[in-house]
Image (cartoon, coloured by chain):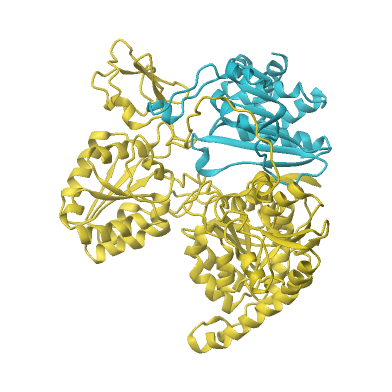
Amino acid sequence: MKELMLGNKAFARGLYEAGCCFASSYPGTPSTEITEEAVKFDEIYCEWAPNEKVALEAAFGASLAGRRAFCAMKHVGLNVAADPLYTMSYTGVNAGLVIAVADDPGMHSSQNEQDSRHHAIASKVPMLEPSDAAEALAFVKIAYEISETFDTPVLIRMCTRVSHCQSVVETGERVLPPQKPYEKNIAKYVMMPGMAKRRHPLVEKRTLDLAEWAETAPVNRVEMGGTDLGIITSSTSYEYVKEVFGDSVSVLKIGMSNPLPDKLILDFASKVKELAVVEEMDPIFEQHCKALGLKVHGKDLLPMEDEYSQNLIAKAFGKTVAAGPAIEDAIPARPPVMCAGCPHRGLYYVLKKNRCTVLGDIGCYTLGATAPLQAADTTLCMGASISSVHGYNKIMGEAGEQHTVAVIGDSTFVHSGMTGLANIAYNMSNSTVIILDNSITGMTGHQQNPTTGYNIKGDPAGKIDLEALCHAMGINRVRVVDPYDLDQCDKAIKEELAANEPSVIISRRPCALLKYVKHKPPLRVNTDKCIGCKSCMRIGCPAISIKGGKAHIDATLCVGCGVCSQLCPVKAFESTGDKEA
Amino acid sequence: METKNIMIVGVGGQGTLLASKLLGQLLLSAGYDVKVAEVHGMSQRGGSVITYVRYGDKVYSPLIDQGEADYIISFELLEAARWMPYLKEGGRIITNTQQMDPMPVITGAAEYPEDIVSKIQAKGVPIDAIDGLALASEAGSARAVNIVLMGRLSRYFDIPEEQWLDAVRKSVPPKFVEVNLKAFELGRNC
């Protein structure tokens, strides 16, 4: 049956049809929906793991136990999972093991623009690159075959425009291979130096075997057209190339980006007058071609940064593109903002008021760095807030300790903040850590995590008690505040910064977008009282604007959190409800 | 057939994804090859969001580029002006006249342009400016703006109305079907 399917959903369908039985992932845009769709198949056990390293190791265990296993992550997640990946390359697998890694050219929702193909090359693990949803489905099945035939984990590189594009897919039936028996094999699975030394040559041979396989494998495809120009491309870039050139050029579509098929590339190059590589981000195919001695265009015409499009490629190759109409006015930007009623807002306001240096982390609360709050100083990677505040304070001493905090979300804290807190406790820095516990993984679209008490299906699950955990790690000062109560937050932050030992403040209130959260009625502004001082504008709430010199509340957005009313010197905000919910 | 391009633009949280889902299903059932590109994640947090719907005999790129859109469906007025350069010559804008101030306007760092509709018209661009929020509210739900706009768009397609209504039924939760069918009719006939 033909269906229109999101790339990530088609990927999940591929897992189902390939007989995958186990999926462990950590959410990360644009990879998240693969696992969210996979969980809809009862035949696949699915879970959210605390981080990508744990997820991949769990998938390794499932493969060892003899069932096809899977793990998904975004590009930066593969950095976290790189440790098991690089050695899994040596051990190989029992049942097939496939890893989805979703890159984000253009950084729609990421902190960097890294190219995951480097990891495939460096770990010597084969990598497939689908161009659309139908290929995503098909490549999952091929990946499992490769994994079991060549005894290796297999990476499938998605990207935003493959993961989050719907295209037409034909579905098939599930085929479940029998469970492979687990056989103890110390020489294969125990990677201590003596064994690993004997595995490494097998890895090198495997890469050569895979390269030979890639010469004729249907994942790589030549589409001969005009021969003045031949283009080597992959992933979503293939679609743009076809859009711009149609059959006027010849195309070598690479479906397996590691290892590359040398003979196929050389043969293709020999049939065209000029050769070009069109690849987003780094010049990996291009450098490979150059190493083969080919003269090739690539990054001399096209950028290393941002995502590509048909116009960008057309212009790079000297074609003119249409320009649409525009009005003369400057169009104000519309950056993402913290939602009305977001529990992070009140806390950030208090941090700003106290002139704190705020070492931030990855999540919705990264938006605290945007105007007008501009309350964050750094955002690096998952967990870096806590580790960095420790180093900062060790150098700064009291000057740092008394007004520097780490700010990290609940999910991010479990992902990789706990180890940083262990460092604070163990190496005794007088640091203050604020855990923004909104009871969900927010930015990626509301996934459960080990602190929420529910699993990926929404069923009751184990629940980490954050207070008890922090105490057990050696933090004596642990307190909980409500971020809607500005005075309470202010008092807690002042006291914990002044305290002469490490502290954890848990700012606890569920995400305002969670369905179970009951909101108060929206507030309204008493315009007779409002003096137009704009104090309420300092929190950057999207529900508040100034109309005719007075504050105005958009009742369709306001959830009655009351943070604005705590800033109003004349108590102009009033409830529209009879009683508080 | 040459590939046709529809852009759906709005503010994160306005329901643009439902509209693109509806259009995608409709065009697939009408026998076209279809691609729909969405944006998830950080951009959804109240930011400017774009969805691309492309259909034809064979669609390659999932994206619509500047100067390519046959239709821009805008859920908010400023977004219509922002994405207007993506319109091709002869392309049409269908916009909700609702205005939502972006943060730089709220903080006073920028101004919301005045008279956007007439400025767009002055460029010779056909524009259907409709009060989608009022029509959606009339239908019974302020959240049905997306379906009101789909109703308006349907006027320009040869696809029979019953097929559109069927697509609406399949795209919205069962208990909101009636409201949305009404919203579609109000949009189509306004």
Say whether residue A289 is left or right of residue A550: right
Question: Would residue A563 be visible to someone looking at this image?
Answer: no
Question: Would residue A224 be visible to someone looking at this image?
Answer: yes
Q: Residue at x 71, y 61 (%)?
A: A139
Position of the C terminus of chain B by quadrant: top right
Residue B138: percent from the left, percent from the top? 61, 14
Q: Nearer the viewer, residue A489 or A539?
A: A539
Residue B130: percent from the left, percent from the top? 63, 17
Q: Residue at x 41, y 41 (%)?
A: A367
Say whether residue A132 is left or right of residue A373: right
Q: How many marks?
A: 0
Image quadrant in which you'd find residue B150:
top right
Q: Residue at x 57, y 86 (%)?
A: A187
Say whether residue A256 is left or right of residue B133: right
Please say if A121 is above or below A72. Answer: below
Residue A311: percent from the left, percent from the top? 66, 44
Residue A335: percent from the left, percent from the top? 47, 36
Please say if A98 is above or below A380. Answer: below
Q: The chain shown in yellow is which?
A: A
Position of the N terminus of chain B by quadrant: top right
Which tint was used for chain B? cyan
Image quadrant in which you'd find residue B162:
top right
